[in-house]
Amino acid sequence: MIDLQRMVAFAAVADHGSFSIAAARLQVSNSHISKQISALERELRVRLLQRTTRSLSLTEAGEVFYRRCKAILSDVAEAEQEVLRRQDSPQGILRVTAPANFSNVCLPDIVCNFMRQHPDIELELTLSDQFLDLAERGIDVALRIATTPPENVHARMLYQIDWSVVGSVEYFATRRQPQTLAELPTYDCLADNVMSAKDVWQFEELGGKQAQRHEIRINPHINCNNSVWLRECVLRGMGIGLLPDYMIGADLAQKKLIKLLPQYAPLPRRHLYGIYLPNRYLSSKVRLFLEAVERGLNP
């Protein structure tokens, strides 16, 4: 395949009828232009330019090649401008996958504001807790909650997911609140087996000079793989639960739920990552979407 830079050099010489003027316009040396033309002629096995000490003209083959070069270079320039316009004003389809529960609670305002700001983008959003194959499904970016991002992809940390042990005001109407981690197994524990092993809660003590970790074995009164459902059970006074803060923030503010033992942070720590396939250039629509999510979650 012909080197595009050789075509640029040839077209510049043909445009200006001069090696020196073409070299000046392209900001290269005369010898560089001469080498590019010679290499092009060797590659095509035809003479393109008729050179004498006083004049420079196109051969018949050069005339034909010049017309095609100009058309090709025009198409390349137009393609470049189209890409740059899309970078300045992103458009087209943006395919995103994200976890269902988190998305239902945290993303509606963020996504709607993003779409208002970028009306030329068409969003295809797939809510799934499974890690879908980005290449196979043609997905531009995945939002995923994990302790560490998966390998062989680019990952941008967007938000820290904190969890808390909580119980309802109704549940503690006839019970004292636990004062130590060791007391937790004596309560009706509602376990989210996605967060940790179904019968073990792990914690890290906050505020100390040296982080201390604690492991508490519980006997779950209810065990479930869906934090939305567990939240409803906790609100109805069925017991205490380990729930993500993004899901219970309003309940705590409205004093429907009580945060227990706030001096301990449940483990393992998780983050929301924006994940996309390795690429030399990150498209503007993906970059702007990730920025919108990060900004919306960290006001």
Image (cartoon, grey):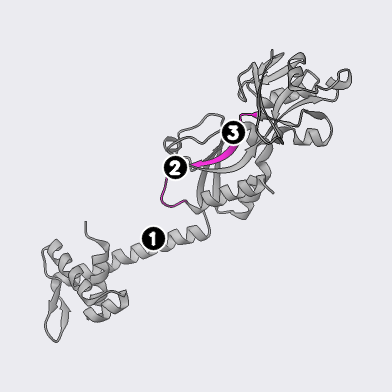
Q: Which mark is residue 79?
A: 1
The percent coordinates of residue 270 (x first, y second) are: 60, 34
- Magenta span of residues: 267-282
Going from N to C along the chain, the mark reached first, 3 or 2, is: 3
Q: Where 266 falls versus 70 (above or below)?
A: above
Callout 2 secondary element: loop
The percent coordinates of residue 26 (x first, y second) are: 31, 74
In the rendered structure, the answer to whether residue 40 lies left or right of residue 209 reads left
The percent coordinates of residue 37 (x first, y second) are: 18, 70
In the rendered structure, the answer to whether residue 201 lies left or right of residue 249 reads left
Going from N to C along the chain, the mark reached first, 1 or 3, is: 1
Pointers 1 and 2 in contact (C-beta within 8 Å): no
Q: Where 131 falls versus 27 (above or below)?
A: above
Residue type, mark 2 in image: Leu
For image coordinates 31% across by 75% down, the residue present is: 27
Callout 3 secondary element: loop
The percent coordinates of residue 260 (x first, y second) are: 78, 27
For image coordinates 64% across by 49% down, the residue present is: 295
Quadrant, the N terminus: bottom left
**Residue 117, located in which quarter of the rendered image?**
bottom right
Q: Which mark is residue 99?
A: 3
Residue type, mark 1 in image: Ala
Q: Which mark is residue 277?
A: 2
Callout 1 secondary element: helix
Q: CA distance from mark 1 to mark 3?
A: 36 Å
Pointers 1 and 3 in contact (C-beta within 8 Å): no
Q: Is residue 278 located in the magenta-colored stretch of the structure?
A: yes
Residue type, mark 3 in image: Pro
